[in-house]
């Protein structure tokens, strides 16, 4: 009987790198590069102006940029509307709708008057039909109905501190054969005629901050450029009270860059005379003020260099 045979053992050796060593370094390197990029973005933002910071924040709040689009169906400028502003606009909307319904002459025009609340404020639109309700066809002249409605709106809008923006829109029909008078001029003239009537009925001159004419660029019915409802006037009551001047300068005259009360002793004329000092004396005074402002007060240590200054100082090259 032959001796018991020994088992055969086969040893296989793997060559090259495998397993966890195959591409792990790539992931680590990518994480490192991402972290460095984030670091330098943060450092750049820390040293940027407030305008740049607001622009970056605005992008992340509205990455698609749809908030900056204009038109009757716009959702606003990307700004958030507070509960107080929304409540104020809702009350104004309800009040205007109730007053329009109370007038029998205007109640039948409910389909031609659209009041909506957007992120920008309260948008009031006067929408035309094929017969021309608010304006004569191809003309910036207001009809009797248009004048009556704008007078009613003025009685409410003039009591508000909010600023107003007025827009004029037309359809694609060319109403004039004159090459120097197109729908651009017509839409702007209609918006201006609405502004004049509102201010004639009590709206403050500084309350209307913008008057725009868009011709047929922002259609209400996009699939039908010739639809009469594309002809309209929009009055936007903007959120906030940016239309009202601060109480301290509400009845003041600005002289030399500073508000001077019109009824102050000596009057504004005296203030103007005082501001007419020789140019050399004014320049010397400004230079003295600038030098004093640049010099830190006694006992106060000089400002330490910022983080960006330290990083720039660590970079190789000639330092200025």
Image: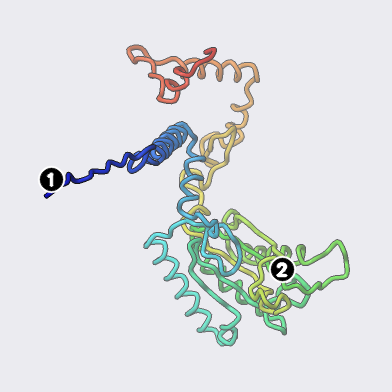
| Local SS, label 1 | loop
Q: Nearer the viewer, mark 2 or mark 1?
A: 1
- Return the x and y of residue 297 as percentages of the image width and height: 38, 15
Q: Residue at x 39, y 39 (%)?
A: 31
In the visual, does 132 lie left or right of 26?
Answer: right
In the foreground, 260 or 318: 318
- In this view, 228 is above or below 120: below
Q: Give me the C-alpha separation between circle 2 and circle 1.
A: 105 Å
Task: Return the mark for residue 3.
Answer: 1
Q: Residue at x 35, y 14 (%)?
A: 301
In the foreground, 49 or 147: 49
- Which residue is most to the front? 1
Task: Return the mark for residue 248.
Answer: none
Mark 2 residue crowding within 10 angstroms, few (<14) / some (14–19) / many (20+): many
- Return the x and y of residue 279 as percentages of the image width and height: 65, 20
Residue 144 seen in the figure: no
- Return the x and y of residue 282 as percentages of the image width and height: 60, 20
- In this view, 317 is above or below 268: above
- In the rendered picture of this protein, how many numbered marks are placed on residues? 2
In this picture the colour scheme is: rainbow
Task: Return the mark for residue 216.
Answer: 2
In the foreground, 29 or 276: 29
| Local SS, label 2 | loop
């Amino acid at each position: 009987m032959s001796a018991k045979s020994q088992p055969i053992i086969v040893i296989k050796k793997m060559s090259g790198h495998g397993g966890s060593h195959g591409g792990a370094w790539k992931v680590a390197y990518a994480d490192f590069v991402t972290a460095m990029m984030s670091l330098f973005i943060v450092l750049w933002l820390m040293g940027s102006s407030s305008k740049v910071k607001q622009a970056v924040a605005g992008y992340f709040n509205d990455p698609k940029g749809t908030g900056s689009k204009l038109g009757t169906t716009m959702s606003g400028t990307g700004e958030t509307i507070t509960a107080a502003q929304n409540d104020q606009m809702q009350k104004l909307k309800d009040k205007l709708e109730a007053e329009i319904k109370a007038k029998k002459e205007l109640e039948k025009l409910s389909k031609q008057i659209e009041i909506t609340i957007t992120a920008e404020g309260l948008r009031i639109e006067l929408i035309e039909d094929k017969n021309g309700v608010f304006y004569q066809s191809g003309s910036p002249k207001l009809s009797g109905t248009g004048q009556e409605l704008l007078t009613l709106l003025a009685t409410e809008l003039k009591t508000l501190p909010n600023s107003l923006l007025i827009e004029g829109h037309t359809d694609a029909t060319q109403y004039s054969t004159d090459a120097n008078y197109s729908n651009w001029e017509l839409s702007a003239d209609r918006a201006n005629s609405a502004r004049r009537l509102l201010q004639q009925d009590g709206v403050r001159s500084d309350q209307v901050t913008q008057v725009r004419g868009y011709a047929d660029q922002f259609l209400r019915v996009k699939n039908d450029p010739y639809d009469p409802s594309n002809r309209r006037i929009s009055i936007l009551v903007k959120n906030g009270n940016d239309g009202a001047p601060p109480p301290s300068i509400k009845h003041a005259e600005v002289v030399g860059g500073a508000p001077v009360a019109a009824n102050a002793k000596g009057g504004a004329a005296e203030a103007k005379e005082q501001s007419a000092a020789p140019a050399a004396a004014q320049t010397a005074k400004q230079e003295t003020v600038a030098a004093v402002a640049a010099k830190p007060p006694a006992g106060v240590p000089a400002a330490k260099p910022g983080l960006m200054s330290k990083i720039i100082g660590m970079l190789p090259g000639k330092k200025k």
